[in-house]
Amino acid sequence: MKKITIIIGVLILTFTSFHFLLREIDTCRVSSGLSEGSAYDALLPSEFVGTVALGGFRAAAVNFFWVRAMDAWEKKIWYEALTLYRLISKLQPRLANIWIINAWNMIYNISVDFNHKEQQELSWEWIKEGVDFLKEGINRNPKSPELYFYLGWVYYDKGKNSIYREYFLKRGEHPVKEACYYIGKAAEFAPSAYYFYNYWYSFMLKERALIEESEGNISEAFTSINDSITALRLAEKSVPKHPDFQQFEDGIKMRLKELDERKALLEKMCESSIQADKRG
């Protein structure tokens, strides 16, 4: 009996020490950006131990938590859904939708509970939490266009609110510029035949050009408009040649015309600025 007690004590001590060691490895691994590979490689070491321990029950556990999470979602029990989706993200970090759904829960469900004027700071905390959760998902899935796009969209959508925009700016993040960067990454990693991401990347570049122009950065605005035209032409090439897409394709042609006109105007403004500098 005494021998068994000693063995159990040693095992507990070993596991505890190993757990703290794994936490240190987790931190180093994340900071080094080591997150590519198979589905198991997306797990942090401490998560890997738990996942391996589950063995063949991992899929069953994911299914169980998923059903519970969807039930909580339908009943609008947001905090329970939050916990369950977090568990699933630990077990299946390669599922981009898990990161997106849980971030949506934080940004568009829980944060709304604190949307009153006197609770804006709490609302922002949940938006920030959702943004950081998406960034964690990208760290685990560095080539997922869906995660990049969704994060970019959140920056753009929430940044339209003047209060949240100020919070983003305090973090050193300009919402439109962040949106442009992340949606650009989505376009980079998306299949070349998929027009959707390039279409929205073009839109964000145009929005960025407007910001740069308002800040007096005419040269940067010109570059953004030029890049916007390039992205939209790539989107145009990959739009399916089908009657159902004809209206969309016509819309792209109209936008290209508008962008070309804007580019010509910015080019003249750049030339005028250069001439003024020479005279000065």
Image (tube, rainbow, N blue to C red):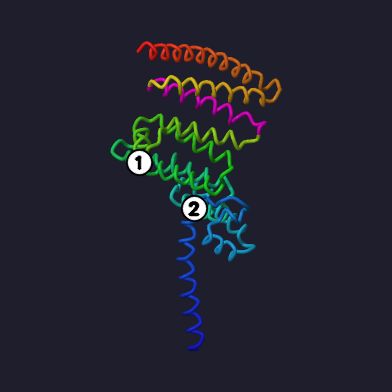
What number is the disc on residue 272? none
Mark 1 residue type: Phe
What number is the disc on residue 30? 2
Q: Is residue 204 magenta?
A: yes
Res. 118 image quadrant: top left
Question: On the picture, is 53 further left or further right than 157?
Answer: right
Question: On the picture, is 138 further left or further right than 168?
Answer: right
Mark 2 residue type: Val
Residue 270 point in image, percent of width and height: 45, 15
Q: Secondary structure at mark 2?
A: helix
From the viewer's perspective, is the residue at label 2 or at label 1 nearer? 2
Picture residue at 48% right of the left edge, 88% below the top: 2
Q: Residue lying farthest right? A: 242
Residue 243 point in image, percent of width and height: 70, 20
Asked if residue 69 is positioned above or below residue 123 in the image, the reply reads below
Of the pair 156 and 187, the residue shown nearer to us: 187
Residue 35 point in image, percent of width and height: 56, 51
Q: Secondary structure at mark 1?
A: helix
User: How many other residues sit within 10 Å of disc 2, few (<14), some (14-19) or many (≥20)?
Assistant: some
Of the pair 122 and 267, the residue shown nearer to us: 267
Magenta stretch secondary structure, dominant: helix
Q: If the image is split into quadrants, where does the C terminus sit?
A: top left
Residue 45 point in image, percent of width and height: 53, 60
Question: On the picture, is 120 further left or further right than 245?
Answer: left
User: How many other residues sit within 10 Å of disc 1, few (<14), some (14-19) or many (≥20)?
Assistant: some
Q: Is residue 103 magenta?
A: no
Q: CA distance from mark 2 to mark 1?
A: 31 Å
What number is the disc on residue 114? 1
Residue segment shown in magenta: 192-215
Asked if residue 51 is positioned above or below residue 78 in the image, the reply reads below
